[in-house]
């Protein structure tokens, strides 16, 4: 078998050579024979004739030779392809409609599949990436679903979990990189030395980090990503050993990562060792993950996540024995969870993507139904030809093959156009913000996608051929000619097949439209949620303070003060403040606080609260509302006053019956000396911290910046101008305050809110596009089928009108047919919409799965569009002239 | 030319393999060689020679190579491959078994029944 395929391939690859060689060989034979004949005494003329006669027909010998090499099948296929192409060229309207339908439907599917392929399917770019896992701490009863992992976790687990062959920890952050005056704020990742070996990918030039580089002072080394190296070093220069300034300190480059190195969605372009002091690694810090330090590990070959989980659980319970916090953590539901690194990273987006693909497939189904109907109508036009050919001996397999060749030619053509449409779609998705999805920065058309497109097209072509082939095979000569001469009605089966398809199409379009409505309504309701502050006219930007220049709070506070003074001096600035994290930044961390006098009730677990440090007029700048008491001011920070402001959720939870003012609380999970307590001086309105659709009233505490500083801060400016107009001013002022600093991530609060809804908006928009196309396709389909019904029954109509039927009667008859189809489709569609609504519950926000108004609206659109599509053919039916109808043909 | 016999179905391939096994030949040469080694008894229909050659080449029992003919013309020469040699051996054995059986059967006299 293999030898024959090989031989066939050899011939196919040089078909021209094969033909030439064959001709030459046969000519040689005839000429030799002629010469031999002449030599034996035959006259040259007679010899040539005899040689040719005895050889037989050259053509049939050649054909037999080709057949011997298995070429005839391909020749036949080529012939059928040419035939099909000729037929398609002969009906350009049909072909164009079909190709556009296919291009749009396949393009939509390919676009979504490109996203699914890039995000869900394509393995992470590491060797045996399926064995990479992440481990994170969770405290569900305290309202903290994820809290990363702590340094302590890392040092306690390293080498002690038998299921792991490697374990590493990393922390995303920012740093100021570059010389004074031309600094940039860069995303950086600090990693443990075994980070690269855990991933199985590390520097291609130079080396990774060593164990001794995880202590301060010894940690002044950096590994660059290829992107950073390209931007800052020319290709020829020697990178290893050169120095770059990071946070004002010269740091030595020791390695460069390969260009393909991508760690999840990390924006980090520089990798540093994650340095820490011994006390940062001790048991007291075991629960200080704080959702910015994360653990990854590699499973040993053959080890499972369940085994690793069991080993981690065992170790955790052994460590709990002498942990003073153990009881409280148990109350909080503490657990360390092992999850697949890839799966965990994309878990949030997975259902949305799968639903988008389902929507795209529904669209494809609608398009396919349209095509089948168009093809059936076409086949009907060739019914006589088919019947005659079958009567003359065309085999069933020939009829079927011919149909398959034609539909596959169409779908493959449509698939190629669809690939082009898909690459446009991917660009559209990028505009819609798909690059902000996890792993979304690398959505590409790759070889797998091209294969899926071609394979899918072929499968679709064969699927489309099934009903057409069935129709063609049923057309027997007698019937076909009879139905023609009698001018009778077309075959019932084919008609009900077409009608069934229309019903299915209407139902599917209704489901798609309803789903879109639910998504759109969810988006609208999410956007209508008040964030709790006034986001208009607020500009924000991020600044990182190098720790060596700003090591403690007085230095940082002094910087804030200078910066805020400068900003306040700018025209059109109404208020300015500083905070270590703005709401909806996506990085809100929660931490514990102990309220004086609050005893945990049985079953109550300690809670995590959003905690912030604020300086300047933060509350006024962000537009918080004051419920009680006063806001924190710059003076509170300057004096490092132990006061704080809580939000109303917090106040309501701890002091439901009394005023929060004057109450005291402690940072951390337990009460300590009274001198450490913070006094509540104000209550502000609750704001959405983690996301607009996050309804958990978790509570928030705002401390003076001096008492909760951070080397990363947000500057918040309220202005009377459109906020973006102030961007350059803020940049300039920051440079004036400290030439080594840079501000970036400069966005208005409104933009931040809009960006936080990207996983809702993009799907809703895509679904909307799908629905518009679906409705259009349904209208085209209904119109086409009904027009055909009218054209086909033209003679019947003519007869009836000649016998006295009124035009209205004829029109109503067709209209009634349309209504019947529409009603059936709508009822089925409502059922489908209900099921789809139930299934996509997780994507909905404040919208019930069965939303009557949406359903009614969607049904209304479908009904109106379909009726308009029916109206035209029905009226044409009513205008049929009996004379023409009967005289026709 | 003496009396010629018609070929039995399936024997053409075997004869071609045999002819080519003696010496690489071009198509016309195969024709002549078969005539020669059968002592002019077997006449191959010229038209069916080439499809048979192509079939054998397709099965990789013979390989073709361009070479010079006796009168210095370009011609396609066929050579037996290893699997062709094996096939020839098998077919010859099968043929001999068949021929013997048929001969025995045909030589049977009434006394032997």
Image (tube, rainbow, N blue to C red):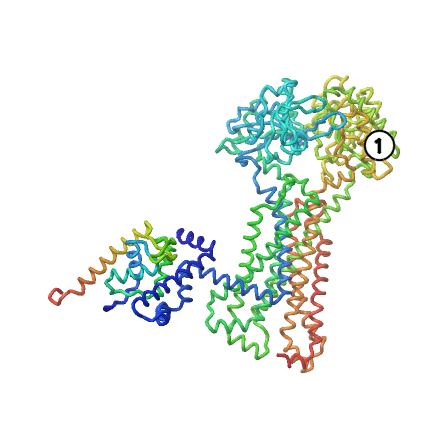
Q: Chain letter of disc 1?
A: A
Residue A291 visible at all: no
Q: Quadrant of residue A69?
A: bottom left
Horizontal side, residue A390 vs residue B35: left or right = right
Q: Residue at x 86, y 38 (%)?
A: A721
Q: Residue at x 23, y 68 (%)?
A: B2
Q: Quadrant of residue A55?
A: bottom left
Graded by Cα atoms within 10 Å as few (under 14), some (14 to 19) or many (20 or more), the crowding at tag 1 reads many
Residue A460 percent coordinates (x, y)? 56, 57
Residue A265 percent coordinates (x, y)? 64, 36
Q: Residue furthest left?
A: B111
Q: Secondary structure at mark 1?
A: helix
Mark 1 — residue? Answer: A620
Residue A467 visible at all: yes
Observer-nearest of A16 and A8: A16
Residue B6 versus residue A165 in the image, above or below: below
Residue A619 versus residue A806 in the image, above or below: above
């Amino acid at each position: 078998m293999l030898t024959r395929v090989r031989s066939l391939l050899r011939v196919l690859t040089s078909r021209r050579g094969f033909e030439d060689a064959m001709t030459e060989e046969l000519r040689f034979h005839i000429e030799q024979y002629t010469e031999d004949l002449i030599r034996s005494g035959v006259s040259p003329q007679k010899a040539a004739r005899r040689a040719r006669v005895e050889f037989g027909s050259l053509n049939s010998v050649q054909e037999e030779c080709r057949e011997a090499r298995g070429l005839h099948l391909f020749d036949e296929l080529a012939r059928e392809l040419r035939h099909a192409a000729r037929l398609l060229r002969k009906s350009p309207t049909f072909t164009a409609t079909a190709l556009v339908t296919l291009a749009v439907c396949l393009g939509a599917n390919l676009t979504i599949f490109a996203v699914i392929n890039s995000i869900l399917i394509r393995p992470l770019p590491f060797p045996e990436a399926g064995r990479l896992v992440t481990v994170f701490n969770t405290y569900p009863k305290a309202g903290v679903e994820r809290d990363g992992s702590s340094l302590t976790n890392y040092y306690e687990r390293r080498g002690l979990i038998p299921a792991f062959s490697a374990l590493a920890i990393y922390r995303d952050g920012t740093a100021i990189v570059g010389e004074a005056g031309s600094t940039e704020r860069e995303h950086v990742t600090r990693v443990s030395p075994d980070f690269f070996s855990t991933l199985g990918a590390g520097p291609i030039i130079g080396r990774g980090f060593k164990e001794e580089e995880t202590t301060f002072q010894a940690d002044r080394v950096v590994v660059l990503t290829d992107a950073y190296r390209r931007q800052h070093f020319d290709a020829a220069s020697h990178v290893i050993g050169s120095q770059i300034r990071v946070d004002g300190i010269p740091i030595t480059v020791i390695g460069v990562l390969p260009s393909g190195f991508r760690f999840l969605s990390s924006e980090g372009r520089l990798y540093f060792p994650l340095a820490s002091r011994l006390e940062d690694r001790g048991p007291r810090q075991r629960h200080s993950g704080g959702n910015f330090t994360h653990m990854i590990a590699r499973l040993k070959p053959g080890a499972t996540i369940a085994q690793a989980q069991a080993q981690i659980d065992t170790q955790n319970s052994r460590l709990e024995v002498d942990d003073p916090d153990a009881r409280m953590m148990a109350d909080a539901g503490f657990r360390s969870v092992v999850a697949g690194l890839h799966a965990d990273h994309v878990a949030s987006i997975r259902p949305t993507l799968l639903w988008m693909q389902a929507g795209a497939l529904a669209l494809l189904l609608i398009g396919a139904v349209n095509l089948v109907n168009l093809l059936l109508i076409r086949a009907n036009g060739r019914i006589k030809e088919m019947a005659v050919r079958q009567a003359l001996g065309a085999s069933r397999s020939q009829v079927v093959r011919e149909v398959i060749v034609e539909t596959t030619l169409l779908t493959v053509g449509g698939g190629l156009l669809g690939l082009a449409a898909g690459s446009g779609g991917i660009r559209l998705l990028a505009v819609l913000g798909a690059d902000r999805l996890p792993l979304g920065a690398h959505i590409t058309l790759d070889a797998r996608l091209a294969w899926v497109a071609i394979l899918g097209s072929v499968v679709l072509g064969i699927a489309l051929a099934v009903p057409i082939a069935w129709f063609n095979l049923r057309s027997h000569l007698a019937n076909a000619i009879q139905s023609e001469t009698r001018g009778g009605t077309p075959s019932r089966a084919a008609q009900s097949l077409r009608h069934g398809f229309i019903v299915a199409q209407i139902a599917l379009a209704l489901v798609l439209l309803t789903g879109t409505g639910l998504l759109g309504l969810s988006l609208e309701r999410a956007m209508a949620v008040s964030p709790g502050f006034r986001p208009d006219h607020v500009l924000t930007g991020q600044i990182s303070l190098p720790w060596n220049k700003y090591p403690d709070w007085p230095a940082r506070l002094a910087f804030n003060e200078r910066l805020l003074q400068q900003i306040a001096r700018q025209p059109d600035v109404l208020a300015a403040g500083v905070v270590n994290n703005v709401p909806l930044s996506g990085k809100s961390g929660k931490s514990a606080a102990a309220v004086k006098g609050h005893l945990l009730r049985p079953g109550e677990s300690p809670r995590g609260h959003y905690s912030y440090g604020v300086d300047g007029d933060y509350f006024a700048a962000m537009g918080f509302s004051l419920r009680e008491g006063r806001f924190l001011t710059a003076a509170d920070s300057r004096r490092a006053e132990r006061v704080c402001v809580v939000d109303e959720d917090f106040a309501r939870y701890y002091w439901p019956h009394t005023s929060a003012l004057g109450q005291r609380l402690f940072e951390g999970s337990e009460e300590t000396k009274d001198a450490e307590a913070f006094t509540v001086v104000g209550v502000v309105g609750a704001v959405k911290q983690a996301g607009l659709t996050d309804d958990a009233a978790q509570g928030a505490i705002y401390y003076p910046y001096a008492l909760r500083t951070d080397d990363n801060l947000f500057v918040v400016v309220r202005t009377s101008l459109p906020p973006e107009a102030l961007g350059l001013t803020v940049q300039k002022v920051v440079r004036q305050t400290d030439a080594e600093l840079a501000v970036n991530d400069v966005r208005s609060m409104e933009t931040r809110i809009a960006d936080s809804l990207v996983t809702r908006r993009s799907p809703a928009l895509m679904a909307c596009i799908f629905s518009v196309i679906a409705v259009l396709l349904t209208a085209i389909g209904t119109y086409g089928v009904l027009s055909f019904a009218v054209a086909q029954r033209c003679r019947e109509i003519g007869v009836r009108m000649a016998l006295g039927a009124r035009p209205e009667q004829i029109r109503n008859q067709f209209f009634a047919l349309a209504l019947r189809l529409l009603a059936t489709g709508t009822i089925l569609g409502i059922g489908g919409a209900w099921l789809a609504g139930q299934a996509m519950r997780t994507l909905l926000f404040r919208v019930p799965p069965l939303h009557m108004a949406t359903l009614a609206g969607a049904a209304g659109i479908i009904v109106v569009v379909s009726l308009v599509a029916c109206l035209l053919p029905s009226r044409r039916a009513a205008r049929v002239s009996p004379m023409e109808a009967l005289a026709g043909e | 030319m003496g009396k010629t016999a018609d070929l039995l179905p399936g024997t053409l391939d075997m004869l071609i393999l045999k002819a080519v096994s003696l010496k690489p030949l071009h198509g016309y040469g195969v024709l002549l060689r078969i005539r020669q080694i059968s002592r002019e008894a077997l006449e191959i229909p010229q038209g069916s020679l080439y499809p048979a050659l192509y079939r054998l080449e397709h099965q990789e029992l013979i390989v073709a190579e361009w070479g010079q003919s006796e009168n210095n013309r370009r011609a396609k020469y066929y050579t037996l491959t290893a699997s062709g040699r094996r096939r020839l051996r098998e077919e010859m054995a099968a043929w001999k078994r068949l021929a013997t059986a048929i001969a025995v059967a045909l030589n049977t006299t009434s006394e032997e029944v």
